[in-house]
Amino acid sequence: MAQSLLVAVVVPAVLFYGVFALAGVWTAIGAALAWSYGAIGWRVVTRRRASGLLWLTAILLTGRTALSLVADSAWLYFLQPVISDGVVALLFALSLASARPMVARLAGDFYPMDHELAMRPRVRRLFWHLTALWAGLGLAKASATLWLLQSQSLETFVLVKSILMLVVNVLAAVLTVALAAYVARQEGLFAHCGETLEAAPEPAAETVPAS
């Protein structure tokens, strides 16, 4: 999970601000988009599966970049995350009323999970709580981004947003992992992994012919 978040969220944010400070906003926009598709391309070449989060990031960045280029407006590029964060948060919130909250649909990107495990009561409650957490987080990010965009200069906005959103995303990821690990311990998943390792047969000793 940590690797998926690092590749899809953290690196593009850090890359964007670094390139923005050195070469300007449009170059930074291109660099963030190039990273996302480069990460997907590398996984295709190395025959590894790109996470749903990485694909979602690439699609959102493509839409933001295309609309901004058509309108020739960097401000529009930064307005779109307000809309996308709000829409994603709404989808997460609406999915709470379904049998499979949004986190349950994405869980396979981060941990191999069969149907039996996904249907355990504690695991289902975890999915519900994490979906509610990320729905609230999306609404908070959208509100904060809109306020910053309207009240600050572009340079200040990019700096504050890059740092603030990176910190928020990392803290939310740590909390998500901590809650998932807590439920995994309650379900005995860590103990099960240990038992599997202990039960693994040792290599057969080489037979030495009698002299």
Image: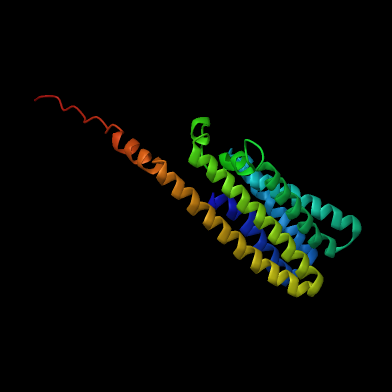
**Which residue lies at the image location 87% right of the left edge and 57% below the top edge?**
69
Q: Is residue 73 above or below residue 130?
A: below
Is 168 left or right of 195, judged from the image as shown? right
Which is nearer the eye, 160 or 172?
Answer: 172
Residue 139 horizontal side relative to residue 71, left or right: left
Q: Position of residue 154 (x, y in %)?
A: 79, 72
Closer-to-camera residue (167/102): 102
Relative height, residue 42 to residue 68 (above, below): above
Q: Quadrant of the C terminus?
A: top left
Q: Locate residue 173, reporting x and y percent.
A: 56, 55
Q: Residue at x 67, y 49 (%)?
A: 38
Question: In the rendered image, is residue 110 in sight?
Answer: no
In the displayed image of the protein, which residue is found farthest to the top?
Answer: 210
Q: Residue 94, can we see it?
A: yes
Left or right of residue 194: residue 42: right
Q: How is the image coloured?
A: rainbow
Q: How many marks?
A: 0
State the image coordinates of residue 8 (x, y, percent, origin top left): 64, 52
Residue 31 in the image: x percent, y percent?
72, 59
Residue reaching furthest to the front = 97
Would you identify the image quadrant in which residue 47 lies? top right
Report the front residue among 158 and 100. Answer: 100
The residue depicted at 57 percent of the width and 42 percent of the height is 107
Q: Residue at left 38%, top 41%?
A: 188
Of residues 77 and 172, which is closer to you in this image? 172
